[in-house]
Image (cartoon, rainbow, N blue to C red):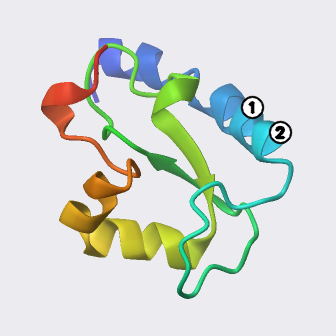
Amino acid sequence: MRRSTSRRDAVYPARRRAVFERADGECEARVDVGCSGACEQVHHVGGRVGPDPHRLENLLGVCAPCHGLIHANPAWARERGLMRSRLQTGG
């Protein structure tokens, strides 16, 4: 891992905690089918690219079923704002 990547990723644990606090235990994706309702994981809406991929605006607290559905269906997730093209992440 490059040194700059290590520094960039050093903020992730604190940001992850902030996402869990913001979500207050609830899945922020709330997909109709299969959502457990519990915030269990962190999803990077615009991927893990750029100088600050772990900024709070790029993170969603999601349940495992929603997270899997988002990644399995990227076009569907983009239509719903649950995923962005990495070219649109904003930095």
Please give the name of the residue rendered at 57% of the width and 59% of the height, measured from the top-left corner: 29
Residue at 32% x, 66% y is: 71
From this viewpoint, which residue is outermost toward the left?
87
**Number of numbered callouts drawn:** 2
* Residue 21 - label: 2
Left or right position of 70 against 87: right
What crowding class fits label 1: few (fewer than 14 Cα within 10 Å), some (14-19), or many (20 or more)? Answer: some
Label 1: which residue?
Answer: 18
Whether pointer 1 and pointer 2 mark residues with C-beta atoms closer than 8 Å, the reply is yes
Q: Is residue 75 left or right of residue 51?
A: left
Secondary structure found at label 2: helix
Q: Is residue 56 left or right of residue 83?
A: right
23 or 41: nearer the viewer: 23
**Relative to 74, does residue 51 appear above or below in the rendering?**
above
- The kind of residue tagged 1 is Ala
Question: 72 or 10: nearer the eye?
Answer: 72
Whole-number angstrom distance, CA of label 1 to CA of label 2: 5 Å
Residue 14 in the image: x percent, y percent? 70, 27
